[in-house]
Amino acid sequence: MPDQPEAHLKPLILAGAVLLSVVAGWTDLRSRRIPNWLTVPGLLIGVTANTVLNGWSGLKASLLGAAIGLALLLPFVLLRSLGAGDWKLAGALGAFTGPSQLMDLLLGSVFVAGLMAVGLVIYKGRVRQTMRNIGHILLSLVTFRLPGSRVSLDNPDSLKVPYGVALALTVVLYGVARVWGVVA
């Protein structure tokens, strides 16, 4: 019997994750920032909701999900290829979803971000330059040298995909797939 109420309450937690990601994606799209006033309470609400609805196992899964989200994306923040708001959003979403679903969401968001990047490159008419930059990066990998400032993310002329938007789209698609029964 304890499994039955938990199954009915999980959509509530998923709804919280979807709501958090939609607001974060919207703010990231508009201002290219995901503010602390959203991510920090999001993490706390995720932990609290999972603890209240699922007890100690919910607390454990929530804290583990947040820790994994923060640990996996920290290197990208330190390399300046990901913003701190995106990083904190992943931690907050991990607090809602737990570790296994967060891993699926992060993997899915990489594909969504890749599709967004391809669309952006085509839209901006920078296919040739992008292919040249990929060549520079591959050559630098083979020669064990840094590729140079022209292909750096710090280059003000580089195209950037807002990762918070990609992560939000992934969470929304996952939520829709859960509602339609496509994923468990």
Image (cartoon, rainbow, N blue to C red):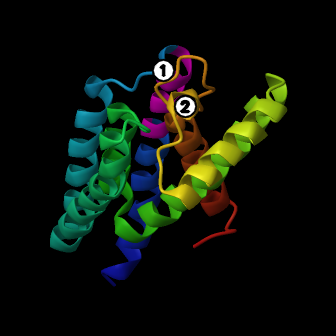
Q: Quick one: which residue is furthest to the front in this view?
A: 143
Q: Residue at x 26, y 68 (%)?
A: 61
2 and 1 marks in contact (CB < 8 Å): yes
Give me the disc on residue 32.
1
Residue 6, numbered circle: none
Q: Position of residue 154 (x, y in %)?
A: 46, 25
The extreme left residue here reads: 56
Q: Which residue is mark 2?
A: 162
Q: Is residue 26 highlighted in magenta? A: yes
- Quadrant containing the C terminus in the rendered view: bottom right
Name the element at disc 1: loop
Q: Is residue 47 above or below residue 124?
A: below
* Horizontal arrangement in the rendering, residue 50 relative to residue 16 (left or right): left
Q: Amino acid at mark 1?
A: Arg
* Rendered-image quadrant of the N terminus: bottom left
Q: Residue at x 37, y 35 (%)?
A: 80
The Cα–Cα distance between marks 2 and 1, rounded to whole angstroms, is 7 Å
Q: Main secondary structure of the magenta part?
A: helix
The residue drawn where x is 36% and y is 71% is 5
Residue 109 at x, y percent in the picture: 57, 51
Residue at 70% across / 61% down in the picture? 180
150 is within the stretch colored magenta: no
- Residues drawn in magenta: 20-30
Left or right, 160 with respect to 8, comes to right
What's under tag 2, amino acid-wise? Pro
Is residue 22 visible in the rendered image? The answer is no
| The quadrant where residue 177 appears | bottom right
User: Disc 2 or 1, which lies upstream in sequence?
Assistant: 1
The crowding category of the residue bearing disc 1, from other C-alpha atoms within 10 Å (few below 14, some 14 to 19, many at least 20), is many
Tell me: residue 98, above or below residue 139.
below
